[in-house]
Image (cartoon, rainbow, N blue to C red):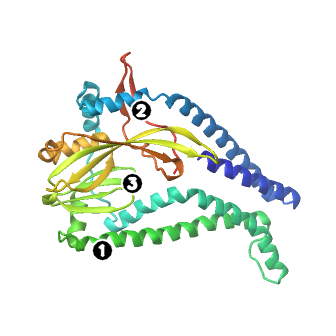
Amino acid sequence: MKILSFIVSLVSLGCYAAGLYFDNTDLTDISLIVLVISGIATIAFFLADREERLRKKNDSLAMNFYNLLSRGEYFTRPIWQKAYRDYCSGYHHRHGSFFGIRMDLTLRYLKRQLFFHSVIICLLAMVLGGAAIPFYAALEDRGFQICLYGDGARAVSTMLIVPIVYVLFLAVISFMKSKKWLDSSDGKEYVVSMPEIESSYREGDFFECSINFVVISSGYVHGFDGVKFYTAARSMISAVAWKVERFTVFRQNRYTSDYIGDEYRFYIMFKDCNDKELFRIPLDQFQIRMIMDNYFSAEAAKCTQIGYEERKLFSFEFMTMKGCTSPVLLEDSTRKFYGFTIGKSKR
């Protein structure tokens, strides 16, 4: 968001200068308002980012978390157990989307695409909005009748139309992607017809975090990790396990990369009888424990070891889940408790 605000500020400054040059009051006023708002946002994001980097640069909390996981103590401590009970007491189960599985998958995949294409959409809107002024003028010089009068109205209308067209394009792609997932579900080693998938999806218990979800019905388990949709018969699932990943996020500069912070992600893994992973879905840590306790207690007992990985990622390829996940609960030597997640991530 900081980079986006900075880009908007630059484009607004250019439009403001163009308005002064062409003596266009509408364009000047609109650009000035956008410039002030985006400038304030840029400064606010910069200060918040700087404070977060300074606060999270210490790696001791990450080491403490890894030691607790490796010793199998993280989920057994009183602080975690109390937080888990509080989470369960306020959690309300829900079922699948009213719109159906195909539309639900389309909207979730579209949300992910919009997140990663947000900068492109804004840049196109700004650039084409500014280019619309000389473009319409050139059309009028060639005898074309333009219904929009005033450079400001033409620029603003173009800036509104471009995102709409781009979003419709992404919606078509998302729909084709969901169609491919559902059509390919019939050809796997288990035979599932589309009506069965739809019925189990609507009737199953829904656990979601951001755009990710796990749906558990009497006969099937469905999952979506933001990239792909999975379906498995419950009879195929022989073991359920934890997986934790630590993402160390950096911002890529021209010559160096700046550390932004860490974010931990908890996965629930479903395995078959050959200990082969069927799929894994990132969820809130308490949701994973609820699934294990209420649906797969025997299968979870077979996998006591917690998988752990560390990955370095750049901000432009990372979509944070911070807004929907419970913080990692750590305890230091002074008996103070911490919720440990990063407060910043791009795309």
Residues 70 and 130: in front is 70
Instruction: Say which amino acid is labelled 2.
Output: Phe
Q: Which residue is mark 2?
A: 340
**Residue at (51%, 48%) from the top-left corner?**
314
The percent coordinates of residue 162 (x first, y second) are 62, 67
Q: Is residue 194 visible?
A: no
Nearer to us: label 3 or label 1: 1
C-alpha span from label 3 to label 2? 22 Å
Q: Which residue is mark 1?
A: 183
Q: Is residue 323 left or right of residue 65?
A: right
State whether residue 21 is above or below residue 141.
above
The percent coordinates of residue 34 (x first, y second) are 71, 50
Q: Label 2: how many residues lie within 10 Å, few (<14), some (14-19) or many (20+)? A: some
Q: Secondary structure at mark 1?
A: helix
Asked if marks 3 and 2 touch (Cβ < 8 Å), the reply is no
The percent coordinates of residue 38 (x first, y second) are 68, 46
**Residue at (88%, 58%) from the top-left corner?**
21
State whether residue 323 is above or below residue 21.
above
State whether residue 270 is above or below residue 51.
below
